[in-house]
Every structure is written in structure tokens, then in C-alpha cells.
């Protein structure tokens, strides 16, 4: 999901000389002080992760994003020590792009958030590596790949997701955002699970530096720098629209008027008759008309230009639970371990 919130890194107060001028702490000392807030994470040596990824072998490349590149690797399931490729427990290693000036802040913020949060729909952060100018994150491995691959993948052996599985994925993502909005955890998800500090309760957070992925950012943030919880709802709406349509948020190879997914879809979403034009044709015959109308209406509400017209994530979860769980009740599965 596109992240809009700017990072707020809280460092320990600097030491002071007798003349009350601050002494600069070494950068690594500041970083290690922040990481101590997440004691459950394992610290890996860079050489360990290099070995576990086969030297960041291109054959183990999983994908990339704003943060950097992600590789498949292996560790011992019990000791969590690096293992040779194809032995032990698979993991995903994200390697920071050293050219990005804000990458270190994002790397640290992700450790602070994911190192303290646990939710079935939130990717688990296992550990990190901090060595010289190398910054890496270690996650649990997701064997089914990314949503992007399943929705947009062109591979002939990649079957398009069914309507039911798409509702399941959307519900999981919505539940995760609802969880992150509870109590004091107000966060944005991006890339492979990037979290950033943001507004508390229903207050507005203002940043002078716009951050995020074009196509996912809400209009008020782009225009003014103002963020609320409803900013997340808009970003979720973009992802939900991609799930429904099977199209990317930005596609420059499409004809003019269709390159921006939200702008292209809005005219159709406002019409009950034309709304079905938005749906991925690969799902035809898999859904009831009423269910599709509910889903399209939810997407339209999430993408409302006016913040007050957007639902909160609790309301989003309620609607998606109706769509997914009701489908399960209508069509009981013989084997509950598999989704058809």
C-alpha cells in the first residue's frame, strides 16, 4: 500500500558540554538506542545474510520497491542462524537502496513498529542487519507470493484470483489497518510493510514533505500535507479498486483517460449500471450482482474526495466481512484448508 506519512524519529537527548552546546552522538549509537525498543528482533551480521541469499543471487530475487530489493534466503528454524540456500526455514531479506537519503529513517521506523506489533495480517519482522552503511530487514517468507503477482502477473502458470479470494485478501488488509488504527498505533503500510508515525486519535498531522507512492496518496495530503486516519482509508480504497479491477493504479501504456485508475473508474463507480465495467473480466460468473454492487459502493466511498464521506476502517471491515463470510456460508467448503 502507498504510504503518505512522514517519518518521525525520536532520538535520545544529546549530551551537553559545560557551555550547554549539544554533543553529537555517533549515528550508529542513536540507531542502536532506537532499536533497543524492539528487543525481540534478532541482529544479523551482513555476512550471514549475504551467505543466506547466495550473495544476493539474482535467482533468489523476489521483487523491489521504494525501499530496495527483496531476496529469498534461509535460516535455521531453531537457532535463526544463517543457513545455506535451500536448507532450513525460508525468509525474505530486504536490502536498503543506499542511494535513497530517507531510506535509513524508513528502515529504523519499520523496526520500531513491526518489532512491537503482532497481527495475523501483518508480515512478521524477524530481525535486521546494521553494519557500516548496510541496512537490511529480515521477514517471514510468504510462500504464495505478493498480491501484485497474483493480480497483475502475466505468467501463464499464475491463475487469476477468484472473487472469493480477492474478498478474503481485501478483508485481511482491512483488518490489519483497523488493528493499526486502534489505541496508539496509527500507521501506514507501504512496499513490503513499511510503517511510519502519523496522527494520533482523530487529530490532523501536517508534514512539509510529501512522501508516498503516486496513485495511492489522498487528494488533501497532496494539496496541503494534512493527514488523518481517513488518509489510510483512501489508500486502502486504491488497493481495493486494484483488487476489483485487476489494474494498476498508474498505467502509462493505456489510452489517455485510462492511465489513472481512480480517475478512470470514478465515473463508472457513480453509476449502478456502468459500475460493472470496472470489474476484472476474469471474475465473470463468480459473484452475485448484489455483492458486486456492495463492493463497488465501498470502493467509491473509500475514494471520496471529501474526508468526511469516507468510512472508517471498522466500517470497511464490517462490509467486507459480510461479502466474504456470507459467501462461505452460502457455499460451505468440503476442505476448509483450501479456498476455491
Image: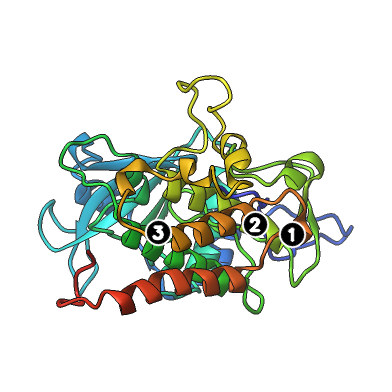
Q: Residue at x 70, y 51 (%)?
A: 304
Q: Are marks 2 and 3 in contact (CB under 8 Å)?
A: no
Q: Are marks 2 and 1 in contact (CB under 8 Å)?
A: yes
Neighbor class of circle 3 (other Cα within 10 Å; few <14, some 14-19, many 20+) is many
In the image, farthest residue toward the front: 273
**Residue that badge 1 annotates:** 309
Neighbor class of circle 1 (other Cα within 10 Å; few <14, some 14-19, many 20+) is few
Q: Nearer the N terminus, badge 2 or badge 3?
A: 3
- Label ID, residue 128: 3
* Secondary element at tag 3: strand
Q: Nearer the N terminus, badge 2 or badge 1?
A: 2
**Residue that badge 2 annotates:** 301
In the image, taking residue 141 as reference, residue 297 lies left or right, namely right
In the image, taking residue 97 as reference, residue 300 lies left or right, namely right
Asked whether 22 or 152 is in front, the reply is 152
Instruction: Name the spot of residue 113 as percent of width and height, x first.
Output: 54, 66
Instruction: Name the spot of residue 79 as percent of width and height, x first.
Output: 21, 72
Q: Label 1, label 3: how many angstroms apart (C-alpha)?
A: 40 Å
Amino acid at each position: 500500500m502507498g504510504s503518505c506519512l512522514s517519518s518521525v524519529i525520536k532520538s535520545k537527548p544529546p549530551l551537553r558540554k559545560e557551555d550547554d552546546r549539544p554533543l553529537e552522538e555517533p549515528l550508529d549509537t542513536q540507531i542502536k538506542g532506537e532499536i533497543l525498543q524492539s528487543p525481540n528482533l534478532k541482529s544479523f551480521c551482513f555476512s550471514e545474510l549475504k551467505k543466506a541469499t547466495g550473495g544476493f543471487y539474482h535467482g533468489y530475487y523476489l521483487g523491489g520497491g521504494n525501499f530496495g530489493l527483496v531476496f529469498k534466503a534461509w535460516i535455521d528454524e531453531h537457532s535463526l542462524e544463517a543457513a545455506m540456500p535451500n536448507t532450513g526455514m525460508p525468509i525474505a531479506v530486504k536490502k536498503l537502496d543506499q542511494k535513497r537519503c530517507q531510506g535509513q529513517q524508513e528502515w529504523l521506523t519499520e523496526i520500531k513498529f513491526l518489532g512491537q506489533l503482532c497481527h495475523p495480517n501483518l508480515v512478521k519482522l524477524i530481525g535486521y542487519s546494521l553494519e557500516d552503511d548496510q541496512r537490511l530487514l529480515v521477514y517471514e517468507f510468504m510462500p504464495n507470493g505478493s498480491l501484485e503477482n497474483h493480480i497483475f502477473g502475466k505468467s501463464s502458470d499464475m491463475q487469476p484470483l477468484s472473487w472469493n479470494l480477492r474478498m478474503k485478501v481485501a478483508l485481511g488488509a482491512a483488518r490489519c489497518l483497523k488493528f493499526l488504527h486502534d489505541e496508539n498505533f496509527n500507521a501506514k503500510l507501504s512496499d513490503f510493510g513499511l510503517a511510519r508515525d502519523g496522527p494520533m486519535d482523530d487529530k490532523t498531522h501536517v508534514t512539509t514533505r510529501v512522501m508516498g507512492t503516486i496513485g495511492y496518496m489522498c487528494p488533501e495530503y497532496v494539496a496541503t500535507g494534512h493527514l488523518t486516519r481517513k488518509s489510510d482509508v483512501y489508500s486502502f480504497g486504491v488497493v481495493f479498486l486494484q483488487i476489483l479491477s485487476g489494474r494498476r493504479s498508474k498505467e502509462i501504456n493505456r489510452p489517455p483517460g485510462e492511465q489513472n485508475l481512480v480517475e478512470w473508474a470514478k465515473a463508472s463507480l457513480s453509476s449502478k449500471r456502468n459500475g460493472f465495467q470496472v470489474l476484472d473480466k476474469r471474475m465473470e460468473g463468480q459473484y452475485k450482482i448484489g455483492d458486486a454492487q456492495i463492493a463497488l459502493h465501498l470502493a467509491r466511498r473509500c475514494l471520496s474526495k471529501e474526508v468526511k464521506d469516507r468510512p472508517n476502517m471498522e466500517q470497511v471491515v464490517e462490509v467486507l466481512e459480510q461479502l466474504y463470510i456470507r459467501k462461505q456460508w452460502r457455499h460451505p467448503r468440503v476442505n476448509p484448508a483450501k479456498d476455491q
